Amino acid sequence: MIELIPVQPSEQTEFRQLAEAYWKELMPKAAVLKDSASRDRHFADSFRWEGEQDRPYWALRAGERVGFVTLSRNGQSAYIDDFYIVPGARRQGLGRRVLQAITARFDSECVTLIELSVRLDNPRGLAFWEAMGFRIASYRLRQYRDPATGTGFVGGLSSDFT
């Protein structure tokens, strides 16, 4: 059985270690990882410790932290902001079980729409979510620009420009 337990403000140090491992794996070249000040800002901007927006939860199996999720909810819609299973706990069906815990929670809250984003450079993530019944509903296009020169860069991820 998987439990989702809110990360407490007093657990931020332990949680941040896991969050940074997630970022390094997901987006190793991103500018937010370049220095501690950037990581501090990204951490502060990404997570909330109260309420229903950007709230991180530990994913626990028999009391052991096997990952985390960050969830947001607005009425009957919800968003899975982050979903991370630690490397040593992968390929054991835990991702599916964590998702089942998330959907059970959202079902009890009468959520009818769950959304999430998958990075362009994460084909394994896309395959997982499609196997779980999620489908591409739209394409969100983006262009990074240099406003000083008016130049648009080719690439959809901030880590394309390191």
Image (cartoon, helix red, strand yellow):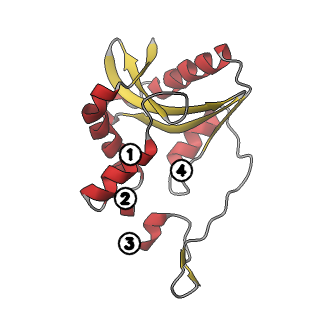
Label 2 packing within 10 angstroms: few (<14), some (14-19), many (20+): many
Report crowding for label 4: few under 14, some 14 to 19, many 20 or more residues within 10 A (C-alpha): few
Q: Which residue is mark 1?
A: 44
Tag 3 secondary structure:
loop
Residue denoted by label 4: 123
Q: Is residue 67 visible?
A: yes
* Mark 2 or 4, nearer chain start: 2
Q: Name the secondary structure under disc 1.
A: helix
- Tell me which amino acid carries mark 3: Thr
State which mark lies toward you, 2 or 1: 1
How far apart, in angstroms, are the residues tagged by discs 3 and 4? 21 Å
Q: Which mark is residue 162?
A: 3
Q: Which residue is mark 2?
A: 32
Residue at 70% from the left image edge and 24% from the top image edge: 111
The nearer-to-camera label among 2 and 4 is 2
Gap in angstroms between the C-alphas marked 2 and 1:
12 Å
